[in-house]
Amino acid sequence: MSKFSSYNFARQKALIRVDFNVPLDKKTFTITDDTRMRAAIPTIKKILNDGGLVILMSHLGRPKEGPEEKSSLKHLVPHLSELLGGTTVLFANDCIGEQAYLTAGMLRAGEVLLLENLRFYKEEEKGDEAFAQKLSKLGDVYVNDAFGTAHRAHASTAVIAKFFPAEKRMFGLLMEGEVSSAEKVLHNSAKPFTAIIGGAKVSDKILIIENLLERATDIIIGGGMAYTFMKAQGGKIGNSLCEEDRLQTATDLLVKAEAKGVCIHLPSDSVIADKFDAAANTSTAPSNNIPDGWLGLDIGANACEQFSNVIKRSKTILWNGPMGVFEMEKFQHGTKVVATAVAEATQGGAFSLVGGGDSVAAVNQFGFTDKVSYVSTGGGAMLEYFEGKVLPGIAAVKD
């Protein structure tokens, strides 16, 4: 049993770092996507069920000059109470200072206190030790359940843990799930292990591809970044997205993959358009022979079949990045086919981890969220983890 699950929080004040950085409507400040909030509910409920007291801290948005209305966490209180089945949620208009300490001191078992935005203080992002210590005085136990910020060395994620003894600092259920799923893929993957890497730029994914060359048996490359690889091999890509300064990088990655016996799969054909527009004229072409004036915006029918076959025979699957401009209906077929193949492979016993904002949006949009093994909540954090970097928010709790 995990440290968190076996811990009895009765009469303990649990100070939980959550990731409630949710999108709000600019006019009404209502929540437009509560995924991150819902992800933290099991952790909060376990503590409340034990008879513990919950104090939540988070950031919201990117406030630059201190407090601002649009980044106040007070807008989240009614919905949070609703998600917790009507539980009383108190709000402190500061995350440190007298009101925060007084409200925390009066908190009763079964109640929740939400603190104001951590980033209203510049000290949060600076990883200021004195600020972290002030935060730590609010709780008896520190729980980090914010995987989405685990790659940031901020006061509330990486510094605060040192003010709690080892037995009183731990991951919440969400963070445990994220870490164990990522470690399963990175260190205990069953073969064949297929990594599906999409998105616009090679430069964003170089490190993850290099790290996966040590572990994966197959790497599928889709999205705009595929055309940089095509051009690097001497292909004609028309007006498709291409990072000219990364042509050598793409060549080097292909050479390294061959040396390590890793099979890189590039899309054999593409759905092409005469402009980047939902109403564009479309056609198909080999991905390495796209006419001038046209650009690749999705993988073609042959590539769909090619990629599906690779995915369906896999035992471990990591998916980061779409196959095309799936936000436009004309160019979403390839991403949908990949999502379907990942779901089928999972049903057949494969372990599948989906992460990165666009991939997560795709599985949600196509209704496959419950048909894959794990959907990660942390885009940047997951990417850095698979690049082989040590995440400060994880190291702080593990040390």
Image (spheres, rainbow, N blue to C red):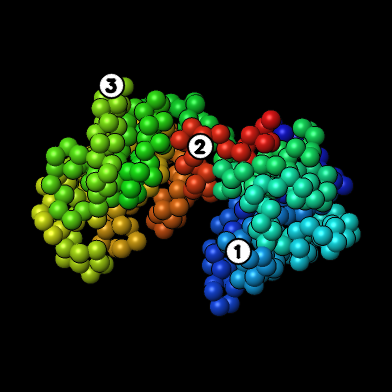
Q: Is the Cβ of the residue at disc 2 closer than 8 Å to that at disc 1?
A: no
Kind of element beneath mark 1: loop
Q: Which residue is drawn at the image coordinates 77% and 32% (left, top)?
A: 166
Q: Nearer the viewer, residue 290 or 43?
A: 290
The amino acid on which the numbered mark 2 sits, given as a three-letter code, is: Tyr
Mark 3 / mark 1, whichever is N-terminal = 1
Q: Quadrant of the N terminus?
A: top right
Q: Is the Cβ of the residue at disc 3 closer than 8 Å to that at disc 2?
A: no
Residue that numbered label 3 is attached to: 259
The residue carrying pointer 1 sits among few (fewer than 14), some (14 to 19) or many (20 or more) residues within 10 Å by Cα, namely some
Mark 3 / mark 2, whichever is N-terminal = 3
Whole-number angstrom distance, CA of label 3 to CA of label 2:
24 Å
Q: Which residue is drawn at the image coordinates 28% and 41% (left, top)?
A: 246
Q: Quadrant of the C terminus?
A: top right
**Mark 2 vs mark 1: in front:** 1
Q: Which residue is drawn at the image coordinates 29% and 36% (left, top)?
A: 249
Residue that numbered label 2 is attached to: 385
Q: Position of residue 334 (x, y in %)?
A: 28, 51
> Along the horizontal axis of the image, is 121 left or right of 339?
right
**Mark 3 vs mark 1: in front:** 1
> Along the horizontal axis of the image, is 336 left or right of 101?
left
Q: Position of residue 105 (x, y in %)?
A: 89, 56
The amino acid on which the numbered mark 3 sits, given as a three-letter code, is: Ala
Whole-number angstrom distance, CA of label 2 to CA of label 1:
26 Å
Residue that numbered label 1 is attached to: 63
Regarding residue 138, the answer to whether it shows in the image is yes
Q: Nearer the viewer, residue 396 or 305?
A: 396
The amino acid on which the numbered mark 1 sits, given as a three-letter code, is: Pro
Q: Position of residue 79 (x, y in %)?
A: 66, 66
Q: Nearer the viewer, residue 167 or 159?
A: 159
